[in-house]
Amino acid sequence: MNRKHRISQVLREFNLTEHPLLLPGGSTQTFRVGNAVLKRIRETSLENNHSLILIQWIADFSLRLHEDGFRVPKPLPTVDNTWITPDGWTAWTFLEGRHASRADIPECIPAIVAFHKALKPISKHPLMDDNRTPWGKADRWCWGEKPAFVEPKLRSLVDQHYALRQPVDDLEFQLIHADLSPEIILIAPGLSHAFLDLSPFWGPPEFALAIFANFSGPRRGDASVLKYFEAIPQFDQLLIRAGIRMLLVMEAVRSDVDSWLLDFISKPQLSKHCFYVKDDGGVRLTLYIVPQLSVTVSLWSKRIEVTVTYTVGFNNSGTNCTNLPSILPA
């Protein structure tokens, strides 16, 4: 079934009649259809390998959230009264707004607090403890023991963060949004701030603020924004954990890529069109890190780059790679 025909079928499944408009950004295609948004959920879309189940749980409790100082999309059912189609499509109410900017940070903080106050009564879903994705691994590492192996290019930064980490006390764990970048917060005149794409993790709500701070400041080379977070209890220690978490997400992805490449050498499964050389000479490829999750990954591990170069014979033209093994399909 071609994509256009499938989208038409999805519209019928949600009883939507207006023309779909492709929205920019996101890791998967998302369409606006009138006052609804269609989004396909993959196995790890919510940074958890049980995303197809968790999204239905999120849809259920989203309807019950009392929106006081924040907005969230509300789920729309299919004609069969389910929250998701058999192949992962969901529908949500469209929310007006632009992405948050640096100037919006002071007003985002109380909205994040209000959002997590509403999330506090939600019980932990059992599948949150079976998170085997890079994000799940990194989240456990930032609170617990450092992984046995860290990529040499990351080791110094990781070690520095762990050396600064100290115990934190009197913080209550609850359901949090653990992917709070400015891009998933919407700002609209006269309306409360909106939060999209809940990534469900269990932690202190202050940690969600630290994740937002890390996205908004250090990751963009602007530590000056951290002044807005000074009143958050134990913020320095939570920011250290947010930094560890982000660094070790890369490490967890790297180890998955490493394992995949070892398998690739013995059983090639990708075509030459999956491989690209970046302008800086590094290697980029699109692959399935876990089943049904297609992502583009830059390979920062020198050993992996050497392995790929040796195996496939990259050029440095910045275009599709040539000289691939003849056993690979075109």
Image (cartoon, helix red, strand yellow):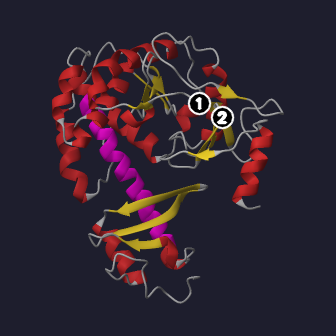
94 and 214: which one is in front?
A: 94
Residue 112: quadrant of the picture: top left
Q: Which mark is residue 259?
A: none
**What residue do we see at 43% from left, 21% from top?**
193
- Compared across the picture, whether 12 is left or right of 141 comes to right
Residue position marked by numbered label 2 in the rendering = 34
Pointers 2 and 1 in contact (CB under 8 A)?
yes
Mark 1: few, some, or many residues within 10 Å (few <14, many ≥20)?
some
Looking at the picture, how far across and down is residue 81, in whole percent? 80, 29
Quarter the N terminus occupies: bottom right
Q: Is residue 181 visible?
A: no
Kind of residue at disc 2:
Gly
Q: Residue furthest right?
A: 80
297 versus 109 height, above or below = below
269 and 32: which one is in front?
A: 32
- Compared across the picture, whether 233 is left or right of 287 comes to left
- Tell which tag, 2 or 1, sits nearer the viewer: 2
Residue 314: quadrant of the picture: bottom left
Residue position marked by numbered label 1 in the rendering = 94
Quarter the C terminus occupies: bottom right
* Segment tinted magenta in the rendering: 239-263
Mark 2: few, some, or many residues within 10 Å (few <14, many ≥20)?
some
Looking at the picture, how far across and down is residue 60, in whole percent? 67, 23
Looking at the picture, how far across and down is residue 29, in whole percent? 58, 49
128 and 195: which one is in front?
A: 195
21 versus 215 height, above or below = below
**What residue do we see at 26% from left, 69% from top?**
280
80 versus 234 height, above or below = below
* Mark pair 2, 1: CA separation: 8 Å
**What residue do we see at 25% from left, 24% from top?**
167
Q: Earlier in the sequence, mark 2 or mark 1?
A: 2
**What residue do we see at 68% from left, 43% from top?**
89
